[in-house]
Amino acid sequence: MNEAQVWMLTTALSAVMLSIPTLFVRVLRSEIGSVRSEIGSVRSEIQRVEQVLSAKFDHLDRDVRVIARKVFGDDPH
């Protein structure tokens, strides 16, 4: 191989060696962004479930108070 071919091979190899970590970092950042958005959607779903359960427990608490009032004759609070 002559000198020009060695320089060309060195340059090509350097370009490949520098581009692989760059592509890896870009893919990794993309995946991290997608995981963050999934976490955000799970968080909002958990908040929605908490609101629904809270409303149901409020009704249950009210019903238990009414039953306690009927059974014991007065409000325990």
Image: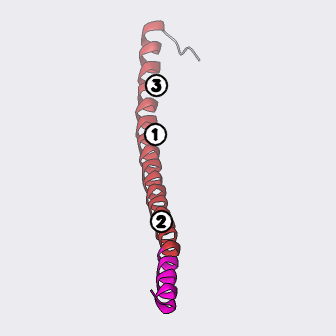
Q: Residues within 10 Å of mark 2 (few under 14, many from 20)?
A: few
First along the sequence among labels 3 and 2: 2
Query: Looking at the rendered structure, which numbered label has been put on residue 24?
Result: 2
Q: Secondary structure at mark 2?
A: helix
* Residue 57 rendering spot, x and y as whole percentages: 44, 30
* Residue 51 rendering spot, x and y as whole percentages: 45, 42
First along the sequence among labels 3 and 1: 1
For marks 3 and 1, give the one nearer the viewer: 1
Is 4 inside the magenta-drawn segment?
yes
Residue placed under numbered mark 3 in the picture: 61
| Towards the viewer: 9 or 30 | 9
Is 21 inside the magenta-drawn segment?
no
| Towards the viewer: 5 or 33 | 5
Q: Secondary structure at mark 1?
A: helix
| Residue at the image point whose x is 41% and y is 23% from the top | 63
Q: Quadrant of the N terminus?
A: bottom left
Inspect the image, locate mark 2, and give the three-letter code of the amino acid beneath it.
Phe
Inspect the image, locate mark 1, and give the three-letter code of the amino acid beneath it.
Glu
What are the residue bounds of the magenta stretch? Answer: 1-16
Q: Chief secondary structure of the magenta span? A: helix
